[in-house]
Amino acid sequence: MKITSLDVPSSFQDVDKIPEELPEGVQIEELMPGLKFWRNPINGFYVMRLHRSADPRKRTKEWEAETRKGLDLAEWLREYELIWEALEGKPVYADHWSQEFHASRTPLSWQRALPVCRGWDFGLNPACLFTQLFPHSRLMVIREMVGIDIDTERFIDEVNRLSADWFPDATFYEFIDPTGVYRAGTDGRSYANLLGAKPLRARRIILGANAPAARRGSVIDFLKGNVKGTACLLVDPSCETLIKGFGGGYFYAYQKGTLRVKPEKNHPYSDIHDCLQYVCSRVLKVDMKLSDSYKPKVREPGFLTQIAKERSVVT
């Protein structure tokens, strides 16, 4: 059984949902809790599977809680749950992301009194993330767009069209890869120039942090924050790619048993997470009139009555 990082449960309470790694087509007997055996039909050898639960002392919640200290979920699966197949990697935000806390169960509504902050990632598979910064430094992630084999100009056209549908008459801020002022599109213009041209006509372009570690750290700062029990980073359920990336699609790969320093560049998860990082790394440093002296009529993060059906994948 191959377990990818997307299959890793979101909490220790979900570990029981992972099936045991047992052979198919052979008779398996259980001698006692935690101890199973079967006969290998090829060589006739007997195989025994000894799980920690064979020791009554290691079945208790108290023992589990004490042993889990200092271990992340992936390490626990390898060391104590007999998941022999190596996981593809460790989710980048495994120690800070909580599906229950950070992913909204119902769609979020946008606030006209606040600007919409778009995070951009360019290249062969461009991506765009739509967010709003609420008072008390709370970031609401409302929509995502993921490009598949589409040129940058056409992708920008689609962003412009859907932005008008989703956020009519909104004020937009663009947060982009800092190399976007140098890297060129198909006609030689930089990506920043493409955003400033028709049809988008972007006028507020902010360069995200350059250091990858600083960008990821800025996301962690939002994930760690809460205001009166409300998450400082809340994601709309329509942002499926971003959520799956948090759940493990965006991960550090193992190389000879050791985690690599940099996350994998795997479309589409790394692309949409780059968008989020560009926003998080700069959004608190941009004056968008959210100071104490500016008092717009802003409601708390709103929730719609039905989950939005659309998921924007542009080809």
Image (cartoon, rainbow, N blue to C red):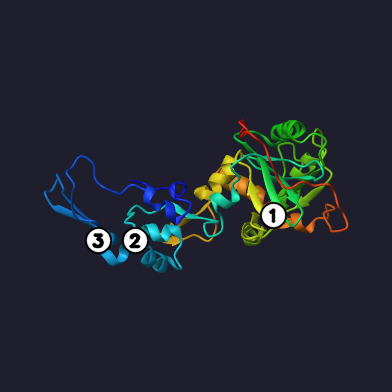
The one nearer the camera, 150 or 48, is 48
CA distance for labels 3 and 2: 12 Å
- Position in image of residue 282 (x %, y %): 74, 56
Q: Is residue 257 above or below residue 179?
A: below
CA distance for labels 2 and 1: 36 Å
Query: Which residue is pictured at 83% across the width and 47% down the height?
Result: 297
* Residue to which mark 1 is pinned: 280
Local secondary structure at mark 2 = helix
Which one is earlier in the sequence, the residue at label 2 or at label 1?
2
Q: Disc 2 marks which amino acid?
A: Tyr
Q: Residue furthest right?
A: 293
The answer, for residue 276, to whether it is visible in the render is: yes
Q: Disc 2 or disc 1, which is closer to the eye? A: 2
- Position in image of residue 97 (x %, y %): 56, 55
The answer, for residue 182, to whether it is visible in the render is: no
The one nearer the camera, 312 or 167, is 167
The one nearer the camera, 246 or 98, is 98
* Residue to which mark 3 is pinned: 54
For mark 2, does the 10 Å Cα neighbourhood hold few (<14), some (14 to 19), or many (20 or more) residues? Answer: some
Which one is earlier in the sequence, the residue at label 3 or at label 1?
3
CA distance for labels 3 and 1: 47 Å
- Position in image of residue 251 (x %, y %): 51, 53
Q: Disc 1 marks which amino acid?
A: Cys
Local secondary structure at mark 3 = helix
Q: Residue furthest left?
A: 44
Q: Is residue 304 above or below residue 266?
A: above
For mark 1, does the 10 Å Cα neighbourhood hold few (<14), some (14 to 19), or many (20 or more) residues? Answer: many
State left or right for residue 76 relative to residue 101. Answer: left
* Residue to which mark 2 is pinned: 80
